[in-house]
Image (cartoon, rainbow, N blue to C red):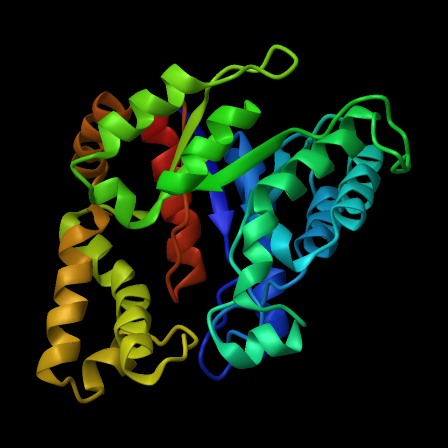
């Protein structure tokens, strides 16, 4: 499988949000140095634990600090934007960094009503997602009523962040898919991917392509990797109680915090499901997943409080995939 990283620019407790963006930039440089194929960034709005709200802006900075790695969004939430504006943003990026830019697209509208109100969107805005995807592609193909500029003469590759319904849309439009979240644990996953590949309608020679997105943490041994995965598992458990996804805490601070029975069960369950371990442990898990899905690419969305340990995990993951 090809190897790529998704960096959500996770914030850390007691540290300015801007440092999360600097960490993303330094991690992108490191990812290129150790041989990753792509580096993706996310779009989240009003989330205390995530500093990345403007993928196109962040990708411009990453492109300026790197030279060869592909850069992309994982993803731009299309219902929050006008397709023409998205096309223009990514054509600018492609003009600046020719042949290196990918556009991953999702349909999320924000997790809370206040965020949706601030974005001037309601839940019905996602209903026209497929039509907006088709419109966006017309801009890239140069066949829309309005010409999106700069006209580079080449379309920006589009990828769809997909669940069950999204996979059907991707098949109809001839788009590659990025699959993550609960569907990866579903017994129906092989059948769903088989249907996607069977019903795929090529667009300008495109072929069905599957990228699997999941958290992967690699360390010298299983126990250390599990510790590194703890801050993200803790943040997820806390968000289930408070409704707010928090910055990452240190392992020591988490161990000293009071744990309710419910939080403990959620944290332990999350760690048990995580792909976290030594290179040999992670390799076995990824080999099973590759056999089950036939995936073409792994998009690792790993995060932990310790930035140096995160870079080491990235390096070991790239080595084992190589």
- Tell me residue 124's x, y (percent): 55, 61
Q: Quadrant of residue 162?
A: top left
Q: Residue furthest top?
A: 205
Does the rendering let one see residue 236?
yes
Taking the spot 55% from the left edge, 22% from the top edge, the residue there is 174
* Near-viewer residue (296 or 32): 296
Taking the spot 10% from the left edge, 71% from the top edge, the residue there is 265
* Near-viewer residue (221 or 211): 211
Q: Is residue 128 left or right of residue 242?
A: right
Quadrant of the frame with the C terminus: top left
- Tell me residue 71's x, y (percent): 63, 39
Quadrant of the frame with the N terminus: top left
Taking the spot 37% from the left edge, 56% from the top edge, the residue there is 309
* Near-viewer residue (265 or 19): 265
Q: Quadrant of residue 22?
A: bottom right
Does the rendering let one see residue 175?
no
- Tell me residue 241's x, y (percent): 27, 82
- Tell me residue 152's x, y (percent): 87, 27
Q: Is residue 237 left or right of residue 52?
A: left
Check the image and report above or below for 78 versus 284: below
Q: Is residue 27 left or right of residue 227?
A: right
Q: Quadrant of residue 316?
A: top left
Q: How many marks?
A: 0
Q: Residue furthest bottom?
A: 258
Taking the spot 72% from the left edge, 42% from the top edge, the residue there is 63
């Amino acid at each position: 499988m090809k190897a790529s990283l998704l960096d959500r620019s996770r914030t850390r407790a007691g540290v300015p949000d801007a440092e999360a963006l600097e960490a993303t930039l330094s991690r992108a440089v490191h990812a290129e140095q150790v041989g990753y194929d792509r580096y993706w960034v996310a779009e989240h709005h009003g989330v205390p634990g995530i500093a990345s709200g403007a993928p196109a802006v962040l990708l411009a900075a990453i492109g300026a600090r790197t030279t060869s790695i592909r850069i992309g969004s994982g993803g731009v939430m299309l219902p929050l934007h006008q397709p023409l504006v998205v096309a223009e943003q990514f054509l600018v990026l492609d003009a600046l960094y020719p042949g290196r830019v990918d556009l991953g697209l999702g349909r999320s509208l924000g997790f809370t009503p206040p965020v949706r109100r601030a974005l001037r969107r309601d839940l019905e805005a996602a209903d026209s997602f497929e039509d907006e995807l088709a419109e966006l592609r017309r801009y890239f193909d140069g066949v829309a009523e309005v010409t999106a500029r700069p006209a580079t003469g080449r379309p920006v590759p589009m990828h769809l962040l997909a669940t069950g319904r999204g996979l059907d849309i991707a098949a109809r439009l001839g788009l590659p898919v990025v699959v993550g979240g609960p569907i990866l644990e579903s017994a129906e996953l092989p059948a769903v991917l088989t249907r996607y590949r069977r019903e795929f309608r090529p667009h300008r020679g495109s072929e069905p392509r599957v990228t699997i997105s999941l958290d992967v943490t690699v360390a010298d041994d299983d126990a250390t990797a599990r510790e590194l995965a703890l801050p993200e598992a803790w943040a997820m458990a806390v968000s289930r109680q408070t409704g707010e996804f928090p910055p990452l805490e240190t392992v020591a601070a988490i161990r000293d915090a009071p744990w309710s029975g419910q939080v403990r069960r959620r944290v332990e369950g999350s760690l048990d499901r995580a792909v976290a371990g030594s290179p040999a442990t992670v390799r076995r898990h990824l080999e099973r997943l590759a056999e089950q899905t036939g995936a073409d690419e792994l998009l690792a969305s790993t995060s932990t409080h310790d930035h140096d340990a995160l870079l080491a995990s990235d390096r070991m993951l790239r080595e084992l995939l190589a």
